[in-house]
Amino acid sequence: MTGFTFSPEQIRSAPIEVRRWLEREIAASLAQIAGPTRDAAPVHAATLAACMPEEAAQLFELIKGDFLLSQVFFELGRDGPDAHAVAPLHAVGLADLLRHTRLGSVDRLGEYFGAINRAFQAIRNDPEATLFGFDQQGHVYVHETTCRSIRLLWERLFSAPMAPAGAGPLASGPMPAEFTPPQVGPSEAVAAHMPIANSAAS
């Protein structure tokens, strides 16, 4: 099995022809990881499951302990139509995904796709459910519903407006009776041992 390791800087600085070649090589490698049936057949919308918003939330609960895994998951909901995608599919360039997540290993990316898909299968209780498809031009495909569900989850988690300063429950009102404010300055015991400034000058 062939392995590839690239730094994000190498991918970013590569000429467009090299990036396109890289995308094709990554797609071929991931298609082999996914299995021969998906490698031989083109991507069809009917073969990809549509992850609903509540399923996306459940999926994130299962994987959120792994930062990089969560990052790959949210990249699937990134905005921007792709010319290679035909509704109801959404395409993500594999080289772009590697660059955004700062992953340099195609093998690790394949492992993350597998982990996300296994979590989805557990939620669906369906070992045949498939979230991902690949083509030979270097793209991973998900259903448009999956993309929208992940993007909606991202917006709910990270784009909610923060409460204005001073609007919290402790911003106003009397302090609880059991609350004792911290003492500002030295205690009496410390103050008794501090030198007096004018006595040091005499």
Image (cartoon, rainbow, N blue to C red):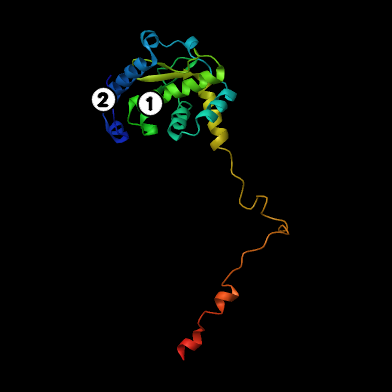
What kind of residue is marked 2?
Answer: Val
Frontmost residue, 71 versus 178: 178
The quadrant holding residue 19 is top left
Compared to 133, does 152 lie above or below?
below
Query: In the rendered image, which residue does mark 2 sit on?
Result: 18
How busy is the neighbourhood of tag 2: few (under 14 within 10 Å), some, or many (20 plus)?
few
Residue nearer the viewer, 26 or 159: 26
Q: Quadrant location of residue 176?
A: bottom right
Q: How many marks?
A: 2
Q: Answer whether residue 81 is visible to the viewer in this image.
A: no
* 72 relative position to 173: left or right: left
Q: Residue at x 57, y 28 (%)?
A: 57
Residue positioned 32% across, 18% down in the render: 29
Q: Work out which quarter of the rendered image holds the N terminus and state it.
A: top left
- What x and y, as percent, mark residue 58? 57, 26
Residue 76 visible, this angle: yes
Q: Identify the secondary structure beneath mark 1.
A: helix
State yes or no: discs 2 and 1 in contact (Cβ < 8 Å): no
Q: Secondary structure at mark 2?
A: helix
Q: Position of residue 50 (x, y in %)?
A: 53, 17
Query: Disc 2 to disc 1, how far (Cα)?
Result: 19 Å
Mark drawn on residue 109 = 1
Q: Is residue 13 left or right of residue 183?
A: left
* Residue 124 spot, x, y in % from top left: 56, 17
- Looking at the image, the residue that sits furthest to the bottom is 202
User: Sequence-wise, which precedes: disc 2 or disc 1?
Assistant: 2
Residue mark closest to the camera, 2 vs 1: 1
Q: Which mark is residue 124?
A: none
Residue 48, image x, y percentages? 48, 14
